[in-house]
Image (cartoon, helix red, strand yellow):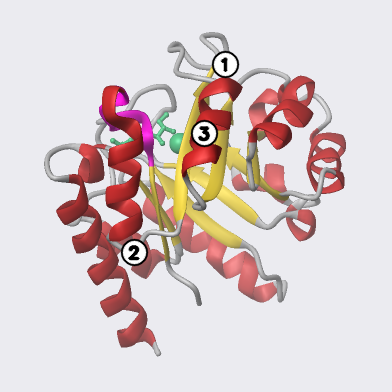
């Protein structure tokens, strides 16, 4: 399995974003997690297409775009043009989830579906084979720096079991409250794509990202 770190810029210093992103890239990260919030699906507002488009000029990282917006199908083309590589929509935010996932694929992008902590996994039963990734929220979306909800661990392992039993190749991304102190638990439960905001961008970004990368490599070596 491929273990990936996707640093979330939500916790970065927006005044020196390009520098912060270079630091995670130099530490070996290959993904960047972009949290788009609309103030309706989630309480807060973050940023949108123009920022992503500017970052696209600066960075070759894989743009992992997490849309926390209502009816995201309205903006899929815009985010594709801005430079998203993967678009994740919330299952709870789509009236026609299959149509939305199909539209993402038709744009030539990878597609993910995110579930809030309290949303049952069975929302994915029929759509799972069409997905590249499932994002399990381990905090209620809307803010960085929240505490990891422990019941997420069982949710991750149940999803991993389902994916294995069904013979699928779908990544499991976990987002919210992850730091070096609980990273191994999250990986052991079956996640392979780790989002980290404050644990990477709080303090010395390069050093933090390097520590995460080291941890992921060690876990992957242990599993092999
Ligand atoms: C929360 C966002 C997360 C957030 C994670 O709604 O989806 O990606 O940036 O931040 P931390 O790692 O600080 O919990
Ligand atoms: Zn996110």
Name the residue: 25% across, 31% down. 145
Q: Quadrant of the C terminus?
A: bottom left
Which secondary structure lies at badge 3? loop
Which secondary structure lies at badge 1? loop
Name the residue: 47% across, 63% down. 157
Precedes in sequence: disc 2 or disc 1: 2
Residue 48 lies within the magenta run: no
Answer few, some or many: residues within 10 Å of disc 1's Cα (few below 14, many 20 plus, some between 14 and 19): some
Q: Residues at badges 3 and 2 in contact (C-beta under 8 Å)?
A: no
Question: Of tags 3 and 2, which is closer to the observer?
Answer: 2
Q: Which region shows up in magenta?
A: 8-14
Precedes in sequence: disc 3 or disc 1: 1
Which secondary structure lies at badge 2? loop
**Farthest residue in the left direction?**
203
Up-down: is 39 above or below 140?
above
Label at residue 41: 1
Quadrant of residue 159 within the rendered picture: bottom right
Label 2 CB-ligand 1 distance < 8 A: no
- Front-most of residues 82 and 119: 82
Label at residue 28: 2
Q: Which residue is mark 3?
A: 116
Q: Whole-percent x and y of residue 4?
A: 43, 63
Q: CA–CA distance between discs 3 and 2? A: 29 Å
Name the residue: 78% across, 26% down. 73
């Amino acid at each position: 399995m491929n273990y990936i770190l996707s640093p979330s810029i939500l916790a970065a210093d927006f005044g020196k974003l390009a520098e912060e992103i270079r630091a995670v890239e130099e530490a070996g990260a290959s993904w960047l997690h972009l949290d788009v919030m609309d103030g309706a699906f989630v309480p807060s507002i973050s940023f949108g297409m123009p920022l992503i488009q500017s970052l696209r000029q600066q960075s070759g990282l894989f743009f992992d775009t997490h849309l926390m917006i209502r009816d995201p199908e309205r903006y899929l083309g815009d985010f594709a043009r801005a430079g998203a590589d993967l678009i994740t929509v919330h299952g709870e935010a789509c009236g026609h989830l299959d149509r939305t996932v199909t539209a993402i694929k038709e744009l030539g992008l990878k597609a993910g579906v995110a579930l809030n902590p309290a949303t049952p996994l069975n929302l994915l039963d029929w759509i799972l084979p069409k997905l590249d990734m499932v994002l399990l929220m381990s905090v209620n979306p809307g803010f960085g720096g929240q505490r990891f909800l422990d019941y997420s661990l069982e949710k991750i392992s149940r999803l991993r079991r389902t994916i294995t039993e069904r013979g699928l190749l779908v990544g499991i991304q976990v987002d919210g409250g992850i730091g070096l102190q609980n990273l191994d638990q999250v990986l052991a439960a079956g996640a392979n794509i780790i989002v980290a905001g404050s644990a990477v961008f709080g303090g010395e970004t390069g050093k933090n990202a390097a520590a995460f990368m080291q941890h992921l490599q060690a876990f992957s070596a242990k599993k092999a």
